[in-house]
Image (cartoon, rainbow, N blue to C red):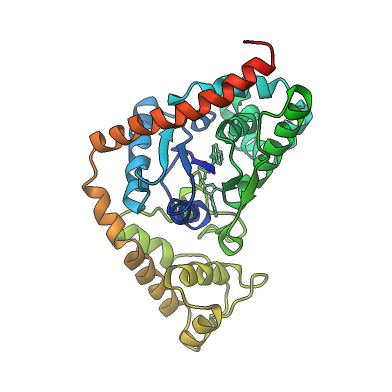
Amino acid sequence: MLTGIQPSGDLHLGNYLGMVRQVLSFQETDDVYLMIADLHAQTVPYNPLEFKNRILDLGKSLLALGVDPKKLVFFRQSEIPEHLYLYWILGTLTPLGELTRMHQYKEKKERYEHVGIGAGILMYPVLMAADILLYQSDVVPVGEDQVQHVEITRELARKYNGAFGEAFKIPQELLIKETARVMSLDNPEKKMSKSLPEGNLPLFEQEQEIVQKIKSAVTDSGSEVIFNEREKQGIANLMVIYKELTGKTITDIEQEFKGVGYGVFKQAVVESFLSFFKDSRKKKENISDHQVLKVFEEGKEKAQSVARETLYIVLQQTGLK
Ligand code: TYM
Protein backbone atom coordinates (compact mmCIF):
# COMPACT_ATOMS: atom_id res chain seq x y z
CA MET A 1 0.00 0.00 0.00
CA LEU A 2 1.03 3.57 -0.59
CA THR A 3 -0.15 6.77 0.95
CA GLY A 4 1.12 10.32 1.12
CA ILE A 5 0.91 13.60 2.96
CA GLN A 6 1.70 17.13 1.88
CA PRO A 7 4.18 19.37 3.73
CA SER A 8 1.81 22.28 3.27
CA GLY A 9 1.01 23.06 6.90
CA ASP A 10 1.28 21.56 10.36
CA LEU A 11 0.32 17.93 10.80
CA HIS A 12 -3.05 17.95 12.57
CA LEU A 13 -5.41 15.62 14.36
CA GLY A 14 -7.47 14.99 11.21
CA ASN A 15 -4.35 13.71 9.41
CA TYR A 16 -3.56 11.51 12.39
CA LEU A 17 -7.01 10.00 12.90
CA GLY A 18 -7.76 9.72 9.17
CA MET A 19 -4.47 8.42 7.81
CA VAL A 20 -1.36 8.29 10.06
CA ARG A 21 -2.71 5.78 12.54
CA GLN A 22 -3.70 3.46 9.69
CA VAL A 23 -0.07 3.56 8.56
CA LEU A 24 1.18 2.88 12.10
CA SER A 25 -0.97 -0.18 12.31
CA PHE A 26 -0.28 -1.52 8.79
CA GLN A 27 3.48 -1.09 9.05
CA GLU A 28 3.45 -3.98 11.51
CA THR A 29 2.01 -6.45 9.03
CA ASP A 30 2.01 -5.06 5.48
CA ASP A 31 4.22 -3.72 2.77
CA VAL A 32 3.78 0.04 3.22
CA TYR A 33 5.14 3.01 1.24
CA LEU A 34 4.72 6.37 2.96
CA MET A 35 5.54 9.44 0.94
CA ILE A 36 5.94 13.13 1.64
CA ALA A 37 4.05 14.69 -1.25
CA ASP A 38 6.32 17.68 -1.70
CA LEU A 39 5.51 18.11 -5.40
CA HIS A 40 1.80 18.24 -4.65
CA ALA A 41 2.46 20.95 -2.07
CA GLN A 42 3.94 23.14 -4.82
CA THR A 43 0.58 23.48 -6.54
CA VAL A 44 -0.34 26.39 -4.25
CA PRO A 45 1.82 29.40 -3.28
CA TYR A 46 4.75 28.61 -0.94
CA ASN A 47 7.94 30.15 0.35
CA PRO A 48 10.97 28.08 -0.81
CA LEU A 49 13.01 28.64 2.36
CA GLU A 50 10.14 27.73 4.62
CA PHE A 51 9.26 24.84 2.34
CA LYS A 52 12.55 23.07 2.94
CA ASN A 53 12.02 23.23 6.69
CA ARG A 54 8.44 22.10 6.43
CA ILE A 55 9.52 18.92 4.70
CA LEU A 56 12.06 18.15 7.43
CA ASP A 57 9.59 19.06 10.12
CA LEU A 58 6.93 16.76 8.70
CA GLY A 59 9.52 13.98 8.52
CA LYS A 60 10.34 14.52 12.20
CA SER A 61 6.69 14.62 13.21
CA LEU A 62 5.91 11.33 11.48
CA LEU A 63 8.96 9.61 12.96
CA ALA A 64 8.03 10.93 16.41
CA LEU A 65 4.53 9.50 16.03
CA GLY A 66 5.93 6.05 15.44
CA VAL A 67 6.53 5.75 11.70
CA ASP A 68 9.35 3.21 11.66
CA PRO A 69 11.68 3.21 8.64
CA LYS A 70 12.70 -0.34 9.48
CA LYS A 71 9.13 -1.49 8.95
CA LEU A 72 8.05 0.65 5.99
CA VAL A 73 9.55 2.67 3.17
CA PHE A 74 9.44 6.37 3.99
CA PHE A 75 10.49 8.71 1.19
CA ARG A 76 10.04 12.03 -0.56
CA GLN A 77 8.06 12.12 -3.79
CA SER A 78 10.37 14.66 -5.45
CA GLU A 79 13.36 12.35 -5.08
CA ILE A 80 11.85 9.75 -7.40
CA PRO A 81 11.59 11.25 -10.91
CA GLU A 82 9.67 8.15 -12.07
CA HIS A 83 6.56 9.76 -10.51
CA LEU A 84 6.78 12.64 -12.97
CA TYR A 85 7.40 10.39 -15.94
CA LEU A 86 4.33 8.24 -15.24
CA TYR A 87 2.34 11.38 -14.42
CA TRP A 88 2.93 12.62 -17.94
CA ILE A 89 1.87 9.38 -19.59
CA LEU A 90 -1.26 9.09 -17.43
CA GLY A 91 -2.01 12.75 -18.14
CA THR A 92 -2.29 11.99 -21.83
CA LEU A 93 -5.08 9.52 -20.97
CA THR A 94 -7.00 11.75 -18.55
CA PRO A 95 -10.23 13.40 -19.74
CA LEU A 96 -9.94 17.13 -19.08
CA GLY A 97 -13.61 17.37 -18.12
CA GLU A 98 -13.11 14.94 -15.33
CA LEU A 99 -10.29 16.97 -13.80
CA THR A 100 -12.36 20.14 -13.83
CA ARG A 101 -15.17 18.32 -12.00
CA MET A 102 -13.01 17.22 -9.03
CA HIS A 103 -14.23 18.64 -5.67
CA GLN A 104 -10.78 19.63 -4.53
CA TYR A 105 -10.01 21.40 -7.80
CA LYS A 106 -13.18 23.47 -7.56
CA GLU A 107 -12.52 24.36 -3.95
CA LYS A 108 -8.86 25.32 -4.48
CA LYS A 109 -9.65 27.22 -7.66
CA GLU A 110 -11.98 29.42 -5.68
CA ARG A 111 -9.62 29.80 -2.75
CA TYR A 112 -6.55 30.75 -4.80
CA GLU A 113 -8.21 32.63 -7.65
CA HIS A 114 -6.85 35.93 -6.30
CA VAL A 115 -3.22 34.82 -6.69
CA GLY A 116 -3.71 33.01 -9.99
CA ILE A 117 -4.19 29.28 -10.51
CA GLY A 118 -1.51 27.13 -12.09
CA ALA A 119 -2.29 24.04 -14.16
CA GLY A 120 -0.73 21.97 -11.35
CA ILE A 121 -3.94 22.28 -9.33
CA LEU A 122 -5.88 20.76 -12.20
CA MET A 123 -3.35 17.97 -12.79
CA TYR A 124 -2.98 17.18 -9.09
CA PRO A 125 -5.05 13.93 -9.20
CA VAL A 126 -2.99 12.61 -12.12
CA LEU A 127 0.21 12.93 -10.10
CA MET A 128 -1.55 11.15 -7.26
CA ALA A 129 -2.51 8.35 -9.64
CA ALA A 130 1.13 8.03 -10.66
CA ASP A 131 2.19 7.85 -6.97
CA ILE A 132 -0.26 5.06 -6.27
CA LEU A 133 0.15 3.01 -9.44
CA LEU A 134 3.96 2.99 -9.50
CA TYR A 135 4.00 0.94 -6.28
CA GLN A 136 1.30 -1.52 -7.40
CA SER A 137 -0.80 -0.54 -4.39
CA ASP A 138 -3.76 -2.75 -3.56
CA VAL A 139 -5.06 -0.29 -0.99
CA VAL A 140 -4.57 3.39 -0.22
CA PRO A 141 -5.17 4.48 3.41
CA VAL A 142 -6.69 7.99 3.29
CA GLY A 143 -9.27 10.32 4.74
CA GLU A 144 -12.53 10.98 2.95
CA ASP A 145 -11.33 14.04 1.02
CA GLN A 146 -8.96 11.86 -1.02
CA VAL A 147 -11.49 9.22 -2.10
CA GLN A 148 -12.34 10.95 -5.36
CA HIS A 149 -8.65 10.95 -6.25
CA VAL A 150 -8.37 7.22 -5.65
CA GLU A 151 -11.46 6.73 -7.83
CA ILE A 152 -9.87 8.54 -10.76
CA THR A 153 -6.69 6.52 -10.15
CA ARG A 154 -8.71 3.33 -10.60
CA GLU A 155 -10.23 4.68 -13.76
CA LEU A 156 -6.85 5.61 -15.21
CA ALA A 157 -5.37 2.23 -14.29
CA ARG A 158 -8.22 0.42 -16.07
CA LYS A 159 -7.97 2.68 -19.06
CA TYR A 160 -4.22 2.21 -19.36
CA ASN A 161 -4.40 -1.58 -18.82
CA GLY A 162 -7.10 -1.82 -21.49
CA ALA A 163 -5.16 0.26 -24.01
CA PHE A 164 -1.57 -0.91 -23.50
CA GLY A 165 -1.63 -4.15 -21.48
CA GLU A 166 -1.82 -5.07 -17.80
CA ALA A 167 0.69 -2.84 -16.06
CA PHE A 168 -1.16 -1.77 -12.92
CA LYS A 169 -3.08 -3.23 -10.02
CA ILE A 170 -6.46 -1.62 -9.40
CA PRO A 171 -6.25 0.15 -6.03
CA GLN A 172 -8.93 0.59 -3.40
CA GLU A 173 -9.18 3.39 -0.84
CA LEU A 174 -9.14 2.41 2.82
CA LEU A 175 -10.98 4.60 5.34
CA ILE A 176 -11.62 4.47 9.05
CA LYS A 177 -15.32 5.20 8.94
CA GLU A 178 -15.66 7.24 12.16
CA THR A 179 -12.67 9.48 11.53
CA ALA A 180 -12.44 9.74 7.75
CA ARG A 181 -13.61 13.33 8.11
CA VAL A 182 -12.63 15.04 11.35
CA MET A 183 -14.31 18.43 11.40
CA SER A 184 -12.84 21.88 11.99
CA LEU A 185 -13.01 23.24 15.54
CA ASP A 186 -14.06 26.72 14.51
CA ASN A 187 -16.60 25.59 11.93
CA PRO A 188 -17.92 22.05 12.41
CA GLU A 189 -19.48 22.10 8.95
CA LYS A 190 -16.04 22.16 7.34
CA LYS A 191 -13.36 19.50 7.55
CA MET A 192 -10.25 20.11 9.64
CA SER A 193 -7.60 21.19 7.19
CA LYS A 194 -3.92 22.23 7.08
CA SER A 195 -4.81 25.26 5.05
CA LEU A 196 -7.38 26.54 7.56
CA PRO A 197 -5.20 26.81 10.70
CA GLU A 198 -7.82 28.54 12.89
CA GLY A 199 -9.88 25.37 13.13
CA ASN A 200 -7.26 22.66 13.08
CA LEU A 201 -5.43 21.00 15.94
CA PRO A 202 -1.71 20.66 15.13
CA LEU A 203 -0.22 17.74 17.00
CA PHE A 204 3.02 19.53 17.88
CA GLU A 205 1.62 22.99 18.65
CA GLN A 206 2.46 24.78 21.93
CA GLU A 207 0.37 23.44 24.80
CA GLN A 208 -1.25 26.82 25.46
CA GLU A 209 -2.47 27.07 21.87
CA ILE A 210 -3.97 23.58 22.03
CA VAL A 211 -5.81 24.35 25.25
CA GLN A 212 -7.07 27.59 23.78
CA LYS A 213 -8.21 26.02 20.52
CA ILE A 214 -10.13 23.18 22.16
CA LYS A 215 -11.70 25.45 24.75
CA SER A 216 -12.91 27.86 22.12
CA ALA A 217 -14.20 25.13 19.77
CA VAL A 218 -17.54 26.16 18.30
CA THR A 219 -20.46 24.27 19.85
CA ASP A 220 -24.22 24.87 20.02
CA SER A 221 -26.17 26.94 22.52
CA GLY A 222 -27.13 23.90 24.62
CA SER A 223 -25.14 22.31 27.42
CA GLU A 224 -25.71 18.55 27.18
CA VAL A 225 -22.95 16.27 25.98
CA ILE A 226 -25.10 14.12 23.70
CA PHE A 227 -24.12 12.63 20.36
CA ASN A 228 -26.21 14.22 17.62
CA GLU A 229 -24.33 14.86 14.38
CA ARG A 230 -27.15 16.87 12.84
CA GLU A 231 -28.03 19.29 15.60
CA LYS A 232 -24.88 19.27 17.71
CA GLN A 233 -22.13 18.94 15.12
CA GLY A 234 -19.44 20.66 17.18
CA ILE A 235 -20.00 18.54 20.27
CA ALA A 236 -20.37 15.39 18.16
CA ASN A 237 -16.99 16.12 16.57
CA LEU A 238 -15.34 16.61 19.98
CA MET A 239 -16.99 13.42 21.21
CA VAL A 240 -15.54 11.44 18.31
CA ILE A 241 -12.11 12.94 19.00
CA TYR A 242 -12.38 12.12 22.72
CA LYS A 243 -13.60 8.60 21.92
CA GLU A 244 -10.64 7.92 19.63
CA LEU A 245 -8.09 9.33 22.05
CA THR A 246 -9.40 7.49 25.11
CA GLY A 247 -10.90 4.29 23.70
CA LYS A 248 -14.20 5.00 25.48
CA THR A 249 -17.55 4.45 23.78
CA ILE A 250 -20.00 7.23 22.93
CA THR A 251 -22.42 5.86 25.54
CA ASP A 252 -19.67 5.94 28.20
CA ILE A 253 -18.90 9.52 27.27
CA GLU A 254 -22.54 10.60 27.49
CA GLN A 255 -22.71 9.04 30.94
CA GLU A 256 -19.41 10.50 32.10
CA PHE A 257 -20.42 14.08 31.28
CA LYS A 258 -24.10 13.95 32.16
CA GLY A 259 -25.20 17.27 33.61
CA VAL A 260 -21.75 18.90 33.79
CA GLY A 261 -21.79 21.21 30.74
CA TYR A 262 -19.43 21.75 27.83
CA GLY A 263 -16.62 23.41 29.83
CA VAL A 264 -15.81 20.29 31.84
CA PHE A 265 -16.05 18.12 28.75
CA LYS A 266 -13.69 20.36 26.77
CA GLN A 267 -11.17 20.23 29.62
CA ALA A 268 -11.29 16.43 29.42
CA VAL A 269 -10.70 16.59 25.65
CA VAL A 270 -7.64 18.81 26.27
CA GLU A 271 -6.26 16.33 28.80
CA SER A 272 -6.88 13.33 26.55
CA PHE A 273 -5.09 15.04 23.66
CA LEU A 274 -2.06 16.06 25.72
CA SER A 275 -1.76 12.66 27.31
CA PHE A 276 -2.19 10.75 24.01
CA PHE A 277 0.53 12.73 22.23
CA LYS A 278 2.80 13.35 25.23
CA ASP A 279 5.54 10.88 24.27
CA SER A 280 5.56 11.84 20.59
CA ARG A 281 5.76 15.52 21.42
CA LYS A 282 8.79 14.85 23.59
CA LYS A 283 10.39 12.49 21.12
CA LYS A 284 10.23 14.99 18.28
CA GLU A 285 12.50 17.43 20.11
CA ASN A 286 15.33 14.89 19.96
CA ILE A 287 15.12 14.03 16.25
CA SER A 288 17.78 15.83 14.22
CA ASP A 289 17.68 17.06 10.61
CA HIS A 290 20.48 14.64 9.89
CA GLN A 291 18.43 11.67 11.12
CA VAL A 292 15.49 12.57 8.88
CA LEU A 293 17.70 13.11 5.84
CA LYS A 294 19.26 9.71 6.39
CA VAL A 295 15.82 8.10 6.55
CA PHE A 296 14.82 9.82 3.28
CA GLU A 297 18.03 8.67 1.64
CA GLU A 298 17.38 5.04 2.53
CA GLY A 299 13.72 5.34 1.58
CA LYS A 300 14.66 6.76 -1.79
CA GLU A 301 16.77 3.72 -2.69
CA LYS A 302 14.05 1.25 -1.79
CA ALA A 303 11.19 3.21 -3.37
CA GLN A 304 13.06 3.89 -6.56
CA SER A 305 13.85 0.25 -7.22
CA VAL A 306 10.11 -0.54 -7.20
CA ALA A 307 9.11 2.56 -9.16
CA ARG A 308 11.69 1.82 -11.84
CA GLU A 309 10.34 -1.66 -12.41
CA THR A 310 6.80 -0.42 -13.02
CA LEU A 311 7.94 2.46 -15.19
CA TYR A 312 10.07 0.15 -17.31
CA ILE A 313 7.01 -1.93 -18.18
CA VAL A 314 5.08 1.23 -19.06
CA LEU A 315 7.88 2.51 -21.29
CA GLN A 316 7.99 -0.79 -23.12
CA GLN A 317 4.22 -1.01 -23.51
CA THR A 318 3.89 2.55 -24.78
CA GLY A 319 6.67 2.17 -27.32
CA LEU A 320 9.20 4.41 -25.61
CA LYS A 321 11.61 1.50 -24.97
P1 TYM B 1 -3.09 15.71 2.85
O1 TYM B 1 -1.68 16.11 3.09
O2 TYM B 1 -4.09 16.80 2.65
O3 TYM B 1 -3.62 14.82 4.04
C1 TYM B 1 -2.94 13.64 4.48
C2 TYM B 1 -3.97 12.60 4.88
O4 TYM B 1 -4.79 13.08 5.94
C3 TYM B 1 -6.16 12.91 5.59
N1 TYM B 1 -6.95 13.99 6.17
C4 TYM B 1 -8.00 13.82 6.99
N2 TYM B 1 -8.58 12.71 7.48
C5 TYM B 1 -9.63 12.88 8.30
N3 TYM B 1 -10.13 14.09 8.65
C6 TYM B 1 -9.59 15.22 8.19
N4 TYM B 1 -10.07 16.40 8.54
C7 TYM B 1 -8.47 15.12 7.32
N5 TYM B 1 -7.70 16.04 6.67
C8 TYM B 1 -6.78 15.33 5.97
C9 TYM B 1 -6.19 12.98 4.07
O5 TYM B 1 -7.34 12.39 3.53
C10 TYM B 1 -4.92 12.24 3.73
O6 TYM B 1 -5.14 10.86 3.71
N6 TYM B 1 -3.15 14.45 -1.96
C11 TYM B 1 -2.84 13.95 -0.65
C12 TYM B 1 -1.40 13.46 -0.53
C13 TYM B 1 -1.04 12.43 -1.53
C14 TYM B 1 -1.47 11.07 -1.53
C15 TYM B 1 -0.86 10.48 -2.68
C16 TYM B 1 -2.31 10.33 -0.70
C17 TYM B 1 -0.22 12.60 -2.60
N7 TYM B 1 -0.11 11.43 -3.31
C18 TYM B 1 -1.10 9.14 -2.99
C19 TYM B 1 -2.53 8.98 -1.02
C20 TYM B 1 -1.93 8.41 -2.16
C21 TYM B 1 -3.05 15.07 0.35
O7 TYM B 1 -3.04 16.22 0.00
O8 TYM B 1 -3.15 14.68 1.65
Ligand 1 - quadrant of the structure image: top right
* Count of marks, rendered view: 0
Relative vertical location of residue 277 with respect to residue 266 in this rendering, above or below: above
Give the left or right position of residue 84, taking residue 256 as reference: right
Q: Quadrant of the C terminus?
A: top right
Residue 298: give x, y in percent of width and height: 34, 32
Q: Tell me which corner region of the image, top left, top right, bottom left or bottom right, holds residue 213.
A: bottom left
Give the left or right position of residue 278, taking residue 25 as reference: left
Q: Quadrant of the N terminus?
A: top right
Q: Residue at image x 53%, y 41%? A: 2
Give the left or right position of residue 104, taking residue 283 as reference: right
- The front one of 260 and 282 is 282
Residue 253: give x, y in percent of width and height: 50, 81
Q: Tell me which corner region of the image, top left, top right, bottom left or bottom right, holds residue 179.
A: bottom right
Give the left or right position of residue 156, taking residue 117 as reference: right
- The front one of 321 and 247 is 321
Answer yes or no: is residue 284 visible: yes
Answer yes or no: is residue 204 visible: no
- The front one of 63 and 139 is 139
Q: Residue at image x 24%, y 44%? A: 287
Q: Residue at image x 48%, y 82%? A: 261
Q: Tell me which corner region of the image, top left, top right, bottom left or bottom right, holds residue 109.
A: top right
Residue 59: give x, y in percent of width and height: 35, 40
Relative vertical location of residue 83 with respect to residue 291 in this rendering, above or below: above
Relative vertical location of residue 285 with respect to residue 113 in this rendering, above or below: below
Residue 295: give x, y in percent of width and height: 32, 36
